[in-house]
């Protein structure tokens, strides 16, 4: 079992394995319930019941459901980064188009299969975390560092701005594709892929 990242929304980070496993069960239950009842109807008591833990265990880690959803968003980002890294490990070094495909494909895969992701993803969909939080900045920074290392380039300000614009654009268009079709409209996704490649070619070619 992989450790749960120490999200900033945690009241107390797990130290022992048993505590980490309990936190994982709580976040898994939160994700399942988000799909079933939505964020408004989500409650810490329902999460505790689904996870099979005392309500006090939930409050040991989280002050409220907002903090719990933020921790789930952080875990989603960690898992997404791991998935992209695994894809890049099998790609030809320096092939930025393959890297962009990996970034988009893994986001789509999580959108279709990861519990709770359609509502929380990385914190974009519901008001989680700090009031001034910028989830797409967090995602763009993570991807800039990951892809610049893969492409063996220095992540300067121009690259960071370019990736932020690309992430914001892809985020908007992917959400549009899922409003049009339950599994994402393939034509909109194909247009998104072409748009990203054309835009990023200016900096990466």
Image (cartoon, rainbow, N blue to C red):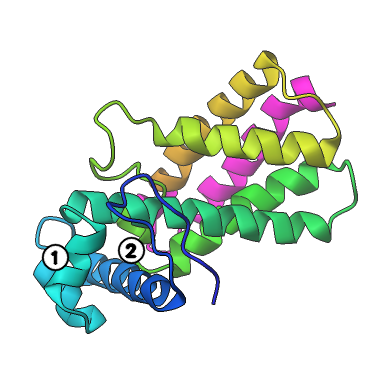
Where does the image place residue 93, in percent across and percent down from the top left? 90, 47
Q: Position of residue 53 (x, y in %)?
A: 21, 80
Counting residues from the N terminus, which is met first, the one under dot 2 or under dot 1? 1
Residue furthest to the top in view is 157
Which secondary structure lies at badge 2?
A: loop
Q: Is residue 22 left or right of residue 153?
A: left
- The main secondary structure of the magenta stretch is helix
Q: Position of residue 176 (x, y in %)?
A: 39, 44
Q: Residue, x 77% and y 27% (percent of image)? A: 201
Q: Residue furthest front?
A: 16
Q: Which residue is mark 1?
A: 44
Q: Of discs 2 and 1, which sits in the foreground?
A: 1
User: Per the image, is 198 magenta?
Assistant: yes
Q: CA distance from mark 2 to mark 1?
A: 15 Å
* 13, 151: nearer the viewer: 13
Q: In this rendering, would 184 be left or right of 115?
A: right
The image quadrant where one finds the N terminus is bottom right
**6 relative to 39 in the view: left or right:** right
Q: CB atoms at circles 2 and 1 under 8 Å apart?
A: no
Q: Residue at x 30, y 45 (%)?
A: 125
The residue at 64%/48% (across/down) is: 103
**How busy is the neighbourhood of tag 1: few (under 14 within 10 Å), some, or many (20 plus)?**
many
Q: Which mark is residue 116?
A: 2
Stretch of the chain drawn in magenta: 177-205
Q: Is residue 122 above or below residue 72?
A: above
Above or below, 104 against 156 in this view is: below
């Amino acid at each position: 079992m992989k450790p749960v990242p120490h999200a900033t929304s945690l009241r107390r980070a797990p130290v022992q394995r048993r505590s980490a496993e309990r936190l994982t069960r709580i976040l898994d239950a939160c994700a399942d319930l988000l799909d079933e009842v939505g964020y408004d109807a989500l409650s810490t008591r329902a999460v505790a019941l689904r996870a099979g833990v005392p309500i006090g265990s939930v409050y040991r880690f989280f002050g409220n459901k907002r903090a719990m959803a933020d921790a789930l968003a952080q875990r989603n980002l960690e898992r997404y980064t791991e998935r992209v890294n695994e894809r890049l490990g099998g790609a030809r070094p320096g092939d930025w188009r393959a890297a962009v495909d990996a970034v988009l494909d893994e986001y789509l895969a999580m959108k279709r299969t990861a519990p709770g992701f359609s509502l929380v993803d990385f914190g974009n969909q519901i008001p989680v975390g700090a009031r001034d939080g910028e989830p797409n900045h967090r995602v763009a920074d993570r991807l800039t560092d990951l892809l610049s290392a893969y492409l063996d380039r220095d992540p300067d300000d121009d690259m960071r701005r370019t990736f932020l614009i690309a992430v914001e654009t892809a985020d908007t268009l992917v959400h549009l594709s899922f409003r049009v079709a339950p599994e994402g409209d393939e034509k909109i996704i194909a247009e998104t892929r072409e748009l990203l490649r054309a835009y990023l070619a200016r900096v990466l070619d």
